[in-house]
Image (cartoon, rainbow, N blue to C red):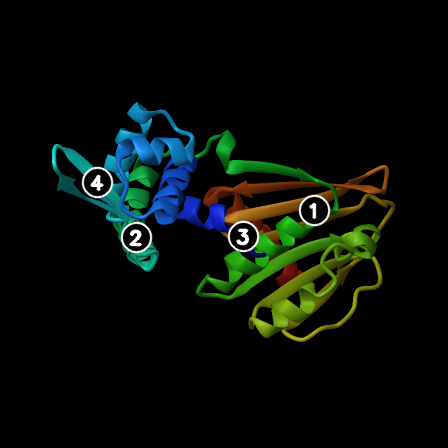
Amino acid sequence: MTINKKECLHQLGLSDRQISIYQALLRLGPASIREVAAESGVNRGSTYETLKQLATKGVVSYFPKGRRRVFQAEDPERLLSLGESKQQALSLAMEQLRKDVIPALKQTQSEFSPGNVRFYEGDDGVEMALRDILDSTADSPEKGYAVISTKTLREHLYRPFPNFTKQRVSRGIRVRVLAVGEGGDEAELAERKWLPAGASTDASYIAIYPPKVAMITLTNNIHPVVVIIDSQAIASTQQILFDTLWELL
């Protein structure tokens, strides 16, 4: 997706007024505050304050001419320096977030809160959950997760994300599946065991990828509802139950 000139300048931290005055100076060349105000359509008081802000950013300079100040726009190439400065500052901020800020915030976070549970609906919610499984599992040492899924839901699961299995395999992620009811395709890096469906026809899918558990079901066998719980305690308990059942089959 491309962005236009004004949006690009916004990304550099320039406001609409700063952009208007900078462009007015580019058209005028060296000019007084009165001339810049007239060309940009901004009142003189605001023009002066904005010119000072632009000078601080290094994209406008000024020099004395008699008893007045004359302002001029720096070459547009100077905008690259402004962008590089913001990029460096952002990189430092990201590093600080990873090393200090996020760990400190996590220490103040309660073990379980409403923020640990996320709800989604529809095919978009299913796709979001499936992508979360891939992204979270790819970063884990085990690079694997476990699934319990019923036949009724399997028919709908990958509708919004048809290349899910291909992406899972390409990222080297393993999965163990307890399939309730017949069916289910064999795939690379996947192990499958079957459980009898019994009398239940409920549609459900449970993915265990510590510290998270994703649960998907269908309302009226049509509309998907997704719940993702981010809790090491819950995920560990679900994993123990899964492993025990897996070994018994």
Query: Residue at point 41% right, 39% down?
Result: 20
| Gap between marks 3 and 2 measured at Cα | 18 Å
Q: Does 27 sit above or below residue 168?
A: above
Q: Please tell me which residue lies in front, 195 or 121.
A: 121
Which residue was labeled with disc 3? 3
Q: Earlier in the sequence, mark 2 or mark 4?
A: 4
| Gap between marks 1 and 3 measured at Cα | 26 Å
Q: How crowded is mark 4: few (under 14 residues within 10 Å), some or many (20 or more)?
A: some
Which residue was labeled with disc 2? 82
Which residue was labeled with disc 4? 70
Q: Which of marks 4 and 3 is nearer the N terminus?
A: 3
| Gap between marks 4 and 1 measured at Cα | 56 Å
Residue 205 visible from this viewpoint: yes
Amino acid tagged 1: Asp
Query: How many labels sit on residues?
Result: 4
Q: Is residue 193 left or right of residue 57?
A: right
Q: Please tell me which residue lies in front, 227 or 41.
A: 41
- Residue 124, numbered circle: 1
Amino acid tagged 4: Val
State the residue lying farthest toward the front: 66
Check contact, mark 4 vs mark 3: CB within 8 A.
Answer: no
| Gap between marks 4 and 3 measured at Cα | 33 Å
Which secondary structure, mark 2?
helix
